[in-house]
Image (cartoon, grey):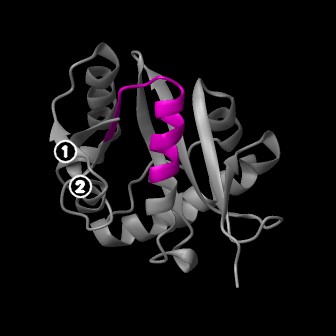
Amino acid sequence: MSLITIRHATAADAELIQAIETSADALLIDTLGTTAWPPAGDGLQRVAAPGFVLVLTETAEGSPVGFVHVMDADGHAHLEQLSVLPDAGRQGYGRRLVAAAQREARERGYTRMTLRTYAEVPWNAPFYASCGFLESLPETPFLRTLTETESRLGLDAHARRVQMTVEL
């Protein structure tokens, strides 16, 4: 029986965080049918960025199989990345990480959390909607810049992108 643990990431987790994102991105790349995809974010930069990174392990001493990165952006929490190893998928780990991220953000005094994702990919917008997120408009300078950055990277060329928000 596994003992699921969610904890704050450390610099020692950085390489695994990047590897988890790369593996999860491969599944998305296949689904979208593209080869043009930006590389996974640098794990060490994620851990050092303003906000927090939580990792999920299947045992107290185990290596992470998933992570969630939440940035401090314009005074609210922005869920920048959620990734779970494909082999560990469909076990509720993503949902546990989102719930833990929402709790942590609430404890830090945030009143809402935003994210950007693909509208029709099942484990993107439909998944986040099941976690309480609703489609919304980019209201802050950070979110408007993020939308422009996604366009510049060509992310919106693959499928429709949306912003989603949940009140905490």
Q: Is residue 150 magenta?
A: no
**Mark 2 vs 1: CB contact within 8 A:** yes
Which percent across, then down, holds residue 56? Answer: 64, 59
Residue beneath disc 1: 134
Q: Quadrant of the C terminus?
A: top left
Vertical position of residue 125 compared to residue 11: above or below: below
Q: Quadrant of residue 1?
A: bottom right
25 left or right, relative to 23: left
Which percent across, then down, holds residue 43? Answer: 67, 43
What kind of element bears circle 2? Answer: helix
- At x 18%, y 62%, the residue is 120
Which kind of residue does numbered mark 1 sit on? Leu
- At x 71%, y 38%, the residue is 44
Q: Is residue 101 magenta?
A: yes
Which kind of residue does numbered mark 2 sit on? Ala
104 left or right, relative to 102: right
In this view, the residue in front, 2 or 128, is 2
- At x 71%, y 57%, the residue is 16
Q: CA distance from mark 2 to mark 1?
A: 6 Å
Vertical position of residue 97 compared to residue 29: above or below: above
- At x 49%, y 77%, the residue is 91
For label 1, the crowd category at 10 Å Cα-Cα, with few meaning under 14, some 14 to 19 and many 20 or more, is some
Q: Which residues are magenta?
A: 99-115
**Residue 33 visible, this orientation:** no
Which percent across, then down, holds residue 112? Answer: 34, 30
**Residue 32 visible, this orientation:** yes
Vertical position of residue 93 compared to residue 48: above or below: below
Residue beneath disc 2: 129
